[in-house]
Structure formats: C-alpha cells, structure tokens
Image (cartoon, rainbow, N blue to C red):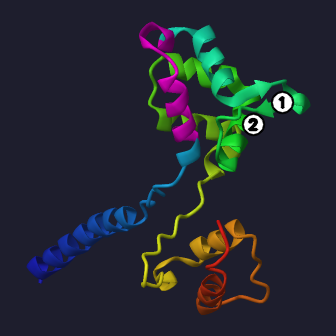
Amino acid sequence: INAEYMGLSCLCALLLIVCPAAAKKSKTKEVDPKECEVCISNLEKIDSLLEGKQKKDKDAVRAAIGQHCTKSGFGSEWKPSTKLTSPKDVKMCYIFEPIKEAITVPFITGMPKERICKKLKKDNPDVCDVKYPIKVEKKEGEEVDYNKLRVKALKSILADRGVKCTGCTEKPEFVKKCQETEHLEM
C-alpha cells in the first residue's frame, strides 16, 4: 500500500510540474510580421541617407530625419517631403518630427531599427499601428481567393478601397464585398 501511495503521489507531483510548464508554452504570443513595418522602413531609409561616421553623430541623424521627412515648416506648418510616396510614410514622418531626439539617441548607439520602433511605441502606440496596405496580387485569368484572408485583412482591404461594408458581420459577407469591389484601385 505504501509503494502504491508513493508512486501515486510522485505521479501527481510530476503532473503539477509539467502541466503549468506546458500551459505557459501555449500562451506565447505570435508576432505580427507587419508590426512596426512602416516605422522600420522609414528608419532604414533614413539610415541609407547617412554614411559611416554620420551614423554616430546626433546632428547628422536629426538632419537625415528632416531630409527624409520634411519639405518645410514645423508643427501645424509642417509639409511632408515630396519623396514620400505612400500616405503611410507621410503619417510616420508626421509622428517622427516632434520626437526626433527620442529617435536619434538609440539610432546613434546602433540599436536595431525594430527595437527603436518598439521603444518609441511605449510613448506613442501609433508608431507600430501604421501599416502598409495589404497587396492583393491578381494574375490574369485567376480570381483572388479572399477566403484565405482573415476578416481583419478583408476590412483593411475594403478601407483602402474606400468602401464600407454596412451590415457585414460574417466573413462570407466581407469576402463578397471584396469581390464586388475588385475593380476599385487601392
């Protein structure tokens, strides 16, 4: 009886140790590959404007941010650079302008662009919320399979097309609306 009791108690103890560890593993968050993509892209473009020693110079980094983002003005008078082709890049530069110093310090230390964006996100969540539009590639003679996309992506596609799906609650309704509005430019 003692041996059975001992074996049973060891089994219970083992289960108590293993189960919480397995539960913790399943709770790890999946990282969104598009998170901070506009921020990272703009920081890489700013980085490409700098050469060697300039990457360690605060004034040169601030000037590069200005060169990349600003045509003229500051604050309410700010005008984006004509080099910015995407409205998402314009929005990111609008966010960057008042926080140049917060970008400059980690930038000159050589911190990876992704970490800089995550650090900026703590003070301004909009930094990583700006995302490029979802590109739907359609080959001639083929239809786009919208059923493979998530509802969030379908909503984003419709928003980029300037279409509202009033009354849509289920995925098939969003898919149908995307198919009906394929002719619209994104």
Toward the viewer: 16 or 134? 134
Q: Which residue is mark 2?
A: 94
Which residue occupies the extreme front position in the image?
140
Q: Look at the numbered disc 1 and give the secondary structure of its residue.
A: loop
- Whether residue 54 appears in magenta in the rendering, the answer is yes
- The answer to whether any part of residue 36 appears in the image is no
Residue plotted at (84% across, 24% down): 73
**Residue closest to the eye, 127 or 70:** 70
The reply to whether discs 1 and 2 touch (Cβ–Cβ < 8 Å) is: yes
Q: Relative to residue 170, is residue 8 depicted above or below?
A: above
- At a point 60% along the width and 72% down the height, the residue shown is 152
From the viewer's perspective, tell me whether residue 138 is left or right of residue 95. left
Q: Position of residue 12 (x, y in %)?
A: 25, 74
Picture residue at 59% right of the left edge, 92% below the top? 172
In percent of width and height, residue 98 lies at 76, 27
Q: Quadrant of the N terminus?
A: bottom left
Q: Which residues are magenta?
A: 39-55
Label 1 sits on what residue type?
Trp
* Magenta: main secondary structure: helix
